């Protein structure tokens, strides 16, 4: 069928292969979705028995044409002698089970988000102590990292959730959690030992504490020359190490990772323009994740990339800056569609990836936009479990209508945490 506007059809004109939209509320029919391709005469009979008088056909999604109107009047009523109520009841039960599964998933997500909130609060707390009570601050940092490292190393299948902070501002603490967690995930994927993973986590958590020493106008002020801004802001790596030198329980290895977190494999980074052979091998992990997170959340928000765009950009344009094995591990850890990626389904629906399982990267969980369903009850589907539903492509969120964006992603910052 040619790509054209949707067509209103009575149930009698339907046949398998027609992609339809049911024009009633989601809770007024037994099907899981309002939009799907008909695969059997049984589905048509169920539509008829559910007292749905008409549907809309989506021609460009269909593989069959509607029956001619002339045939409609001459045909007997659909399955007029067949009682479809048992099948309707069974479909309703299946739908209810899926709803209950979504509710269970939401509870799991809420628990994960609660753990994330605690971690961010801990980072805010330790950051406030870094000047006056550095030893206590570092002890708190070790507690945060130890907890995350244990969760990472305890499971073969890592579940990465999309989470958000209760606060709506983008700050250094959320960035610290993201860099710390994602760096440890890379280390875990590459089978680094526990100490290496914890060093990555600690360095990721503390890599930017030196920014507290730099006046904010050097980051956001418009009256600062580019050269002056670059000179001052690049000092933050050294300032971070100065803070860490006041904490005797921080290892030299962690300090080196913090100092080198803006170095690149080709020697184009700072502060020392070191090439890969002269760097701590773990430093490029922190550098990679830090670069990725800054692509997603630059100071100039108009230049922000989605998680999938940032990964693609790194792989295609910046691979020479990083260790190829570590970059490959990062891509495989995050998946083709990282949490926070807006996607278009083959049903023409828009959704956002909210969970990725490390063993099923092509089959994430997606929250689907539907104006007829309240956001708190939004459908959350596992792509692997939904027959006939697939991700068609990742899309930019910038071109989406505001009501779709706010429904799917009300937060100003996308962050990740593990189950």
Image: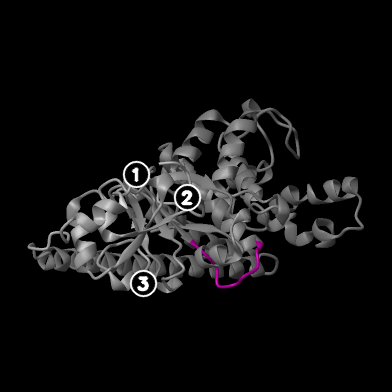
Q: Nearer the viewer, mark 1 or mark 2?
A: 2
Q: Would you call the spot at circle 2 few (<14 residues within 10 Å), some (14-19), or many (20 or more)?
A: some
Q: CA distance from mark 2 to mark 3?
A: 22 Å
* Image coords of residue 42 (percent x, y): 17, 55
Q: Quadrant of the N terminus?
A: top left
Q: Nearer the viewer, residue 415 or 46?
A: 46
Regarding residue 284, the answer to whether it shows in the image is no
Majority secondary structure of the magenta segment?
Answer: loop
Residue pictured at 64% horizontal, 44% vertical: 291
- Magenta segment, which residues? 163-171
Q: CA distance from mark 1 to mark 2?
A: 19 Å
The residue where tag 2 is placed is 344
The residue where tag 1 is placed is 360
Could you say whether the residue bearing mark 3 is in a helix, strand or loop? loop
- Side (left or right) of 296 relative to 74: right
Q: Quadrant of the C terminus?
A: bottom left
Regarding residue 7, the answer to whether it shows in the image is yes
Residue pictured at 71% horizontal, 50% vertical: 303
Could you say whether the residue bearing mark 2 is in a helix, strand or loop? strand
């Amino acid at each position: 069928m040619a790509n054209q506007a949707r067509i209103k059809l009575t149930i009698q004109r339907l046949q398998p292969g027609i992609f339809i939209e049911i024009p009633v509320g989601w809770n007024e029919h037994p099907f899981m979705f309002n939009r799907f391709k008909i695969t059997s005469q049984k589905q048509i009979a169920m539509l008829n028995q559910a007292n749905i008088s008409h549907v809309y056909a989506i021609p460009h999604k269909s593989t069959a044409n509607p029956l001619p109107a002339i045939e409609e009047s001459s045909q007997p009523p659909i399955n007029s002698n067949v009682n479809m109520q048992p099948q309707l009841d069974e479909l309703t039960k299946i739908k209810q089970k899926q709803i209950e599964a979504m509710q269970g998933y939401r509870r799991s997500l809420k628990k994960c988000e609660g753990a994330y909130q605690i971690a961010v609060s801990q980072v805010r707390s330790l950051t406030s102590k870094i000047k006056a009570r550095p030893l206590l601050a570092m002890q708190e940092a070790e507690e945060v990292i130890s907890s995350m490292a244990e969760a990472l190393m305890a499971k073969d299948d890592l579940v990465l959730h999309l989470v958000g902070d209760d606060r709506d501002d983008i700050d250094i603490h959320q960035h610290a959690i993201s860099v710390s967690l994602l760096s440890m995930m890379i280390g875990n994927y590459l089978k680094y030992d526990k100490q290496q993973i914890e060093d990555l986590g600690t360095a990721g958590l503390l890599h930017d504490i030196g920014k507290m020493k730099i006046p904010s106008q050097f980051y956001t002020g418009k009256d600062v020359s580019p050269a002056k801004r670059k000179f001052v802001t690049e000092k933050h790596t050294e300032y971070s190490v100065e803070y860490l030198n006041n904490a005797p329980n921080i290892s030299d290895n962690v300090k080196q990772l913090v100092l080198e977190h803006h170095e690149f494999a080709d020697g184009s980074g700072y502060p020392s323009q070191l090439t890969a052979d002269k760097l701590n091998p773990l430093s490029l992990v922190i550098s990679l994740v830090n670069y990725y997170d800054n692509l997603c959340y630059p100071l100039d928000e108009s230049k922000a990339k989605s998680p999938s765009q940032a990964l693609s950009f790194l792989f295609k344009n910046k691979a020479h800056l990083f260790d190829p094995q570590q970059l490959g591990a990062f891509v495989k850890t995050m998946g083709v569609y990282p949490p926070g990626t807006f996607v278009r389904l083959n049903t023409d629906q828009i959704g956002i990836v909210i969970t990725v399982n490390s063993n099923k990267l092509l089959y994430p969980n997606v929250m689907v936009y539907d104006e007829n369903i309240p956001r708190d009850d939004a459908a959350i589907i596992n792509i692997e479990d939904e027959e006939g539903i697939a991700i068609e492509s990742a899309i930019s969120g910038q071109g989406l209508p505001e009501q779709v964006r706010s429904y799917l992603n009300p937060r100003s910052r996308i962050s990740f945490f593990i189950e």
